[in-house]
Amino acid sequence: MPTVRTTVNVDSAALREASRLLGTQGTSATVNAALQRVVRQLLLADFDIRREVDGTPEEVEEGRSGRPGG
């Protein structure tokens, strides 16, 4: 993964809390983990299984009911 070295002003309290919640150590690790988490969360927020999966909504529900925990 390519990286870029930059200088930013970071809220120290937010950094500490993010580090605690993410289980990271160090500013770079915390900032990178937080950025990755936000990207994933926003991408998944737009994901609609009924639209993205081939099959009717009924077929999707049928497939879910056959899975453990479904």
Image (spheres, rainbow, N blue to C red):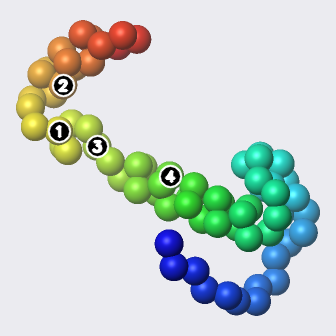
Q: Are marks 3 and 4 in contact (CB under 8 Å)?
A: no
Secondary structure of the residue carrying numbered label 4 = helix
User: In the rendered structure, which amino acid carries the disc numbered 4?
Assistant: Gln
- Looking at marks 1 and 2 on the same chain, the residue that comes earlier in the sequence is marked by 1
Residue at the spot of label 3: 48
Residue at the spot of label 2: 60
User: In the rendered structure, which amino acid carries the disc numbered 2?
Assistant: Val
Q: Residue at x 36, y 10 (%)?
A: 68
Residue at the spot of label 1: 53
Using residue 65 as the reference point, say whether residue 12 is left or right of it.
Answer: right
Residue at the spot of label 4: 41
User: Rounded to the nearest whole Å, what is the CA distance between mark 1 and mark 4?
Assistant: 19 Å
Q: Residue at x 14, y 21 (%)?
A: 58
Picture coordinates of residue 65, whole percent (x, y): 26, 11
Q: Are marks 1 and 2 in contact (CB under 8 Å)?
A: yes
Q: Which quadrant would the C terminus be assigned to in this image?
A: top left
* Residue 65 appears in the figure: yes
Q: Residues within 10 Å of mark 2 (few under 14, many from 20)?
A: some
Q: Residue at x 51, y 79 (%)?
A: 2
- Looking at marks 3 and 2 on the same chain, the residue that comes earlier in the sequence is marked by 3
Residue 48 lies in what quarter of the image? top left
User: In the rendered structure, which amino acid carries the disc numbered 1?
Assistant: Val
19 over 54 or under it: above or below: below
User: In the rendered structure, which amino acid carries the disc numbered 3?
Assistant: Asp
Q: Residues within 10 Å of mark 1 (few under 14, many from 20)?
A: few
User: Rounded to the nearest whole Å, what is the CA distance between mark 2 and mark 4?
Assistant: 22 Å
User: Rounded to the nearest whole Å, what is the CA distance between mark 3 and mark 4?
Assistant: 13 Å
